[in-house]
Image (spheres, coloured by chain):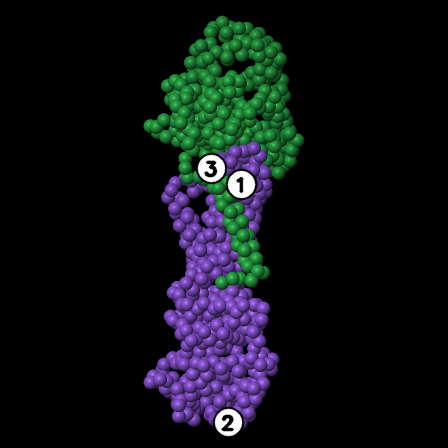
Amino acid sequence: MTLAAGPLRSVVASRFASLILVVLAVWAGLAVLPQRASPDQAVVLAFAAAQNISLPPDSPVFTFDDQLFSHQCGRFLAPAGQPMRLFPYGETQCQTAAATAIAVVYPADIRLLWALLTTEERNEFSSSLRDTSYWLRQSLTASIGKSFFEEYRPIVRAILQNALERSLAQPQVREAIERALRTVSSNDVDRILAGVVPVALERVETNLWNNVRGWFNPGSEPVGAGQIVAGILSDPRVRNHLYTTLPPVLSNPAMADAAVLAAAEFVAAAIDDPRLPQLLQHLLTDRRLTQGLGHGALPEGMPRKLLKLRSPTDHNPLSAYVLRLAMHGHGGSVALLLSQAQYSRVSAVAGRGAMLSVVKRQ
Amino acid sequence: MTGARAVITLEGLSITTPGGRVLVENADVSLGPGEVVLLVGPSGSGKSTIINALSGLLGADGAHWQVQGRVHLAGKDYDLAQDVCNIGGLVFQNNALFDDLSAAGNARITADHIGSVDPAIAELIGELLHDVDPGQNVASLSGGQCQRVAIARTLLANRDVLLFDEPNSGLDKLAARRLAQLIRKLCHQMGKPALIVAHHVDDLLPLADRVLFLDSARRMLRELPPDRAEVDSALLCETLPSEPRAQTAAPYSWKLKPHSPWRWQFHYLNEYFWILCASPMLLGYVMLGAGIVGFVSIWFGFNYDALGDFVRSVVHDDALMGIGFIEMTVVVPLISCLLMVACNNAVITADLGNRVLSSQFRAMSNLGIPARRYIYVSVGVNMMLAGLLLTVASGVIASFTSYQVWRLIFVGQPYELWMENFFREFLRSERALMVHGAWTLFKVAATAAVATASALMIGGKRKESVISINHAIARSIIIGASATLVIHAVVAVLQF
């Protein structure tokens, strides 16, 4: 059977077009679909020294450029009871790194991210943090001075007082304070009292005679002991004396331990207070307060700086990996392939890490 | 009305339409060997119904005709009320050639289904079609050539009587006379009678042996004197020149050695494969759809996320995994099935509608060819195949486009980072791959089956006009596409 030239040409053209499309699809499939065969180039690794590090059975491996920007370069398989193996990606950069770089395992935490920032980036980040802290303090101070904050003051005071009482009622806090006080030497006490007692005597004497005079003048009010003590403490001479004599006393280890314990118990007691969540909810949803905060120094770009993203659309696989582990509540470690120079820079901040040595190349 | 040398006798013929109208009552007809009988009558009187009854086609479309009478033929009796009487080979008014086959294909498919070809008939056909290129598509044949191919095809069936339904319709005077002469000659050569339904009898009367008039008022058949026929017959035999042969080209040879009928099943499987699976337009448009899915899901997934800039990097791996998973298990199968069903249901319905409207199925049925089985099986198999192939191709193209768009957004990142995350859910374990693959396979197969069934049912129903084909196409697309959406939605709910 023969077809006429026209229809034959049409059929051939149609089949040819179909064939081209099928070949195109096959080519696209070969280009992007995962291959069933496992990668043939693997590096068997082992810790250079005994380590007590738990590695995930399958995790990414990263290399870095000159600016310590990460590049995901392979998979690191550490199945329980089997040798650790590194499977580098096919790119030349990854293959080279697998062949020449130092393999180190670091805890995947924010310290590692900090270590990967350059000095300029760290300075920039710190500067932003300082600006933000300063702005936050100023804004909050301004808000506390506003009249609307009086609505919150009684409940704030009640929560703080309750926290203070509960923390001081804790036996371990009391014991710590007593231990701390026992460490204070008589010389220290003498030195403190030496600047306080003369002023106290002066105040007591003055108020004593004023009270005696008052007994003969029915209209005048007697001065109480509390007023006398407040007067002593507000005296500039006493304050200046305490500023110079108290810090050395308070900085001894027992005193510091007691202070830390007391502060921790104070914070715990405050958090336990059922009134606190309600107070925070009111504060955070009070438009008068948030208006007072303003938007001048919000920590704009800080997450991007810490995650070391060079542009809004950038992807830093190591930072993302570390942050995801933190968000999911998983601790963990991560394997890095570093040049000697990079290792020096990273280890200066993040520590030496756990070095891996090559056992065999497959 | 029973001739002395009758080969076929029809007694007590009564036909009532499904609507209850009586067309003919208690009529008797006899046809002698080589006799040419004209059946005339007013439009709608039931002439075509009588020849349909003799070719076994009456009621084939499911309509409830009431037929009574007996047919005696060479010692065999047919009770028309109970038996299917297909003693006649019918040449349809519009020829009903299979327009997807060549001229030879139309003859060969018949030859393959009758088992053996009488050498005398083969010689007759060779003579009849001497100027017709066997490989020529029927659409490019002239009207006269089409008619001769249709007659040749009917001759091959080697039935006891030749039936013609208005064979001179649409022919000029000369062609009509040549046709009448041809019919006459064939009947004489084969010794078989011919019953011709005609409105315009001027060109046929001269060659007719007898004329039967279907009187619709009296619901009876009566014979008219063929006076003019005898005169005209003698005159035409002397004056009409025989059809001129091509002087410059050698006559075509028609080889009609029968083969296994199964080759026609493969023929139609192949034919519909290139229409329903591998048509470049279909492939191109489904692949375009898949490419757009790949582009949209990655571009808008990463560029217009509501989470902000730095979060994009944090969620990158999981977002890519989610996009890849949804793309491969839900969106790509849905888009490819939807596009395939919209295109193929239109093609199938139009194809079947055309075959129904032009009586191709009836012609095939008359010739003993299981046309619906061939075509329905071929359509079903190829729709299933198309669903699978196009879904795979769409998946590949969507993946490829996704990767290219991802590379544009995340410049410098390695291919493996994309691959590990985009296919993470499938690479997780063999079982995950099998489970998701099985669900996808199931919904694609279910979609193809339901869409095919709807297209075949809608396309294969009786068609009155081209408009009814158009309406059927629209209905088929809507039902097929709606079924696709419902199936994929239900499977998605079950799967996840």
Q: Nearer the viewer, residue A308 or B278?
A: B278
**Residue flagged by tag 3: what amino acid is it?**
Glu
Position of the N terminus of chain B, as image quadrant, is: bottom left
Q: Is residue B339 visible?
A: no
Q: Which color has been applied to chain B in this rendered view?
A: purple
Q: Which color has been applied to chain A in this rendered view?
A: green
Question: Mark 1 — residue?
Answer: B403
Q: Secondary structure at mark 1?
A: helix
In primary-sequence order, the first of circles 2 and 1 is 2
Q: CA distance from mark 2 to mark 3?
A: 88 Å
**Mark 3 chain:** B
**Residue flagged by tag 1: what amino acid is it?**
Tyr
Question: Mark 2 — residue?
Answer: B224
Question: Mark 3 — residue?
Answer: B420
Please identify, in this view, whether the residue under mark 2 or under mark 1 is nearer the observer.
2
**Residue flagged by tag 2: what amino acid is it?**
Leu
**Mark 2 chain:** B
Where is residue A27 drawn, in percent x and y? 51, 43
Q: Is residue B313 visible?
A: yes
